[in-house]
Image (spheres, grey):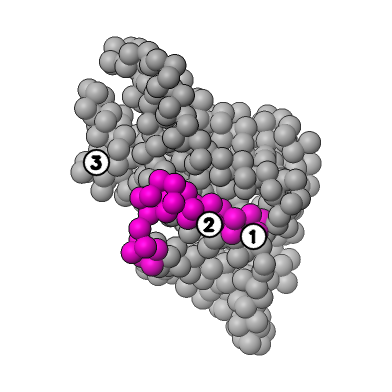
Amino acid sequence: MLLVLAFLGLLILGVPIAIVIGLTAVIGLMDSGINLQLAAQRMYSGVDSFTLMSIPFFIFAGDLMLKGGTSKRLINFANVAFGWITGGASVTAVASCMLFSALSGSSTATVAGVGKIMIPNLIENKYPPKFAVGILCAAGSLGIILPPSIIILVYGVVAEQSIGALFIAAIIPGLFIGFVLIAVAVIYSKIHKFPTNKRPALKDVVKSFGEALISLLMPLLVLGSIYTGVTTVTEAASLAIMYSFVTGFFIYKELKPEDIFPTARKSVIITSMIMFVMAATSILSWYMTFQQIPITLANAILQLSDNPIMILLLVNALLLLIGMVIDPSAAVLVLTPLLLPVVTSLGVDPIHFGIIMVVNLGIGFLTPPAGLNLFVAVGISKLSMIDVVKGCLPFVAVMIAALMVITYVPWLSLVLVR
């Protein structure tokens, strides 16, 4: 109770999340009479990991791709490939987000990279502005679901699961959500009779595919090298940087020498935020384990019900609520040690639970007050926050429905892994 009150109190006061987590842990240590030198030791050991080096590498690779002209080539290919079907512009928006998500590993980067082009394009094609921002925010959330997702990587480190297996497990659920959003876009466009493009000539499809092919090969390079055992996750991430640099600088020739330092600086800032949260959470995780809080919580939840369906429903509800107010990386770091023992005691595979958790937190990008995709969409569309939230609400419902399917059909997450 002391930990909960301290955590909520600091959160309400607007204290940054990393400091909230760290101070909560320190209060727990002081209450238990534990030497506070342990806090410094745990913070250091919590980020002293070769695997965690892949986080700044993947972030930097994604930023280089964004600067190097990848997004507009992916969008052009998606437009040529899908723009001619019913709801072509909205289908292009979702497909572009799916393609860019497989490169960036970030939801906000996906919304920013694709939204700058596609939100004005959708509005120009007579789509309501609320629908335009709603579908972009929803499709942008795939950035943390489809590999190489930074949040999946964080979960793998905390849960001590194979990063390669988690990346592979996320492919079908991510594609499933993407296809659900495409189906919604097609139905909505058919009802409202929005315009579509002419069917492209085969040579135009081949040309746009050829321009985008170099970018599309990067996810195959990363996942293939990890899953075949040729490289570790960190080595694959460093390969992604080299690939992004060569692509943007020598092939597309849109990445300039003066872009390197600002891009690296941006990546360092984002990495510092994530690492600070991870360092602080390592103290809290150690303290909770020391006090046997995960076991106590697991027993308490299992006393409410021993029905896996009900327990997973409760866990999903908790994750959706947490995703509204806490950064996804912090949520993964705090909740994984608490919830993983609960679900594994019910026979839920840790890989499957990782996908459930990440999809939940992806929905959190669409919900106030902490939904980062909302803020990006406000900046791009110039709509008010209220209008952006209204545009996202129908897609939140759609994604929750998709989440329920992913939760109760573990085959989607585990078939490729097995």
- What's the distance in space between the residues labelled 1 and 2, CA to CA? 11 Å
Task: Judge whether 105 appears above or below 291 on screen.
Answer: above
SS at circle 2: helix
**Residue at screen point 66% across, 56% down:** 233
Q: Are marks 1 and 3 in contact (CB under 8 Å)?
A: no
Residues at discs 3 and 2 in contact (Cβ within 8 Å): no
Q: Residue at 72% x, 45% y: name it.
A: 227
Residue indicated by mark 2: 241
Quarter of the figure with residue 392: top left
Could you say where residue 208 lies in the image, as x and y percent from the top left?
42, 29
Q: Which residue type carries mark 3?
A: Ser
**Rounded to the nearest whole Å, what is the CA distance between mark 1 and mark 3?**
36 Å
Q: Toward the viewer: 215 or 291?
A: 215
- The amino acid beneath tag 2 is Ile
Instruction: Please provide percent x and percent y for residue 188.
Output: 36, 18
Say which quadrant the C terminus sits in: top right
Q: Which amino acid, mark 1? A: Thr
Residue 291 visible within the image: no
Q: Position of residue 391 (x, y in %)?
A: 31, 33
Labels 1 and 2: the sequence-earlier one: 1
Question: Comparing marks 3 and 2, which lies closer to the viewer?
Answer: 2
Camera-side mark, 1 or 3: 1
Q: Main secondary structure of the magenta part?
A: helix
According to the picture, the residue beneath numbered tag 1 turns out to be: 234
- Extent of the magenta region: 233-262
| Numbered circle sitting on residue 381 | 3
Q: Earlier in the sequence, mark 3 or mark 2?
A: 2
Horizontal side of residue 351 vs 176, given as left or right: right
Q: Position of residue 42 (x, y in %)?
A: 65, 77
Question: Measured along the vertical axis of the image, is residue 197 above or below residue 388?
Answer: above
The answer to whether residue 13 shows anywhere in this view is: yes
Q: Is residue 254 magenta?
A: yes
